Image (spheres, grey):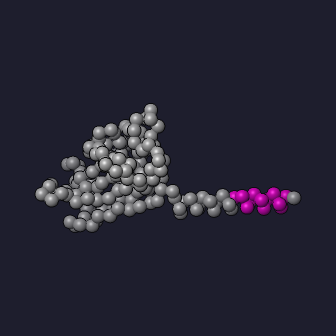
Amino acid sequence: MKKKILYSLLLIVAIFLTYVAYLINNPVSPLLTASYAEKNKDITVTYSAPFKNGRLIFGLESESPLVPFNKYWRTGANRHTMIKTSTDLIFADNVLNSGEYSMYTVPGENKWDITFNSTNAYFGISQPDSKKDLFTISVPSNKLDTTVEQFTIDFIPSPPGGPSSTAIRLRWDLTEIVIPFN
């Protein structure tokens, strides 16, 4: 009788561990990487990309959005968003030295605060230690005409005849954020 109970418990533990391994290897919000390799710069941004799935994404806390305005957001799902650069980058007169950093945001209705932090821990359960914040910049929030179903980060070049900067672009639902850098 004791052997049956022991075998049953071992079977339950094995099933649970298999399920956990499956979830880690097949997340609902896949881990994606956006890359930029031009102008002697080699940059990657790694992030978890959740889907809208009919939910309210950004909004006032009273509306119960997935990401409330004026609150810390790890800028994706599951893990912190990480930026890795082989050269120094300039964001609004702030220098981000070559290396790997976490990037998190505080979305707002009209502007977002983007913070670069020296933490390179990968799980985004809580906000990184603010003592390790390198700098924060603010960028305007733009409204899109069409919905972006999956959270997306990519790089966009400077417009022809515009400033000689490139930008990291974040898009989800009807919101777009453009973070220029040199």
Q: Which residue shows up at 39% across the image and 38% down it? A: 59
Q: Is residue 102 above or below residue 15?
A: above
Q: Quadrant of the N terminus?
A: bottom right
In percent of width and height, residue 15 lies at 68, 60
Q: Is residue 88 magenta?
A: no
> What type of secondary structure mainly makes up the magenta span?
helix
Q: Which residue shows up at 47% across the image and 50% down it? A: 53
Query: Which of the pair 179/55 is nearer the observer?
Result: 55
Question: Within the image, what quadrant is residue 130 found in?
Answer: top left
Asked whether residue 145 appears in the rendered view, the answer is yes
Q: Which residue shows up at 72% across the image and 58% down it? A: 12
In the picture provided, is 152 more to the left or to the right than 137? right
Query: Which residues lie in the magenta part?
Result: 2-13
In percent of width and height, residue 150 lies at 41, 55
Q: Quadrant of the C terminus?
A: bottom left
Query: Which of the pair 64/106 is nearer the observer?
Result: 64
Query: Which of the pair 40/61 is nearer the observer?
Result: 61
Kindly give the residue lying farthest to the top in the view shown. 62
In percent of width and height, residue 153 lies at 35, 56
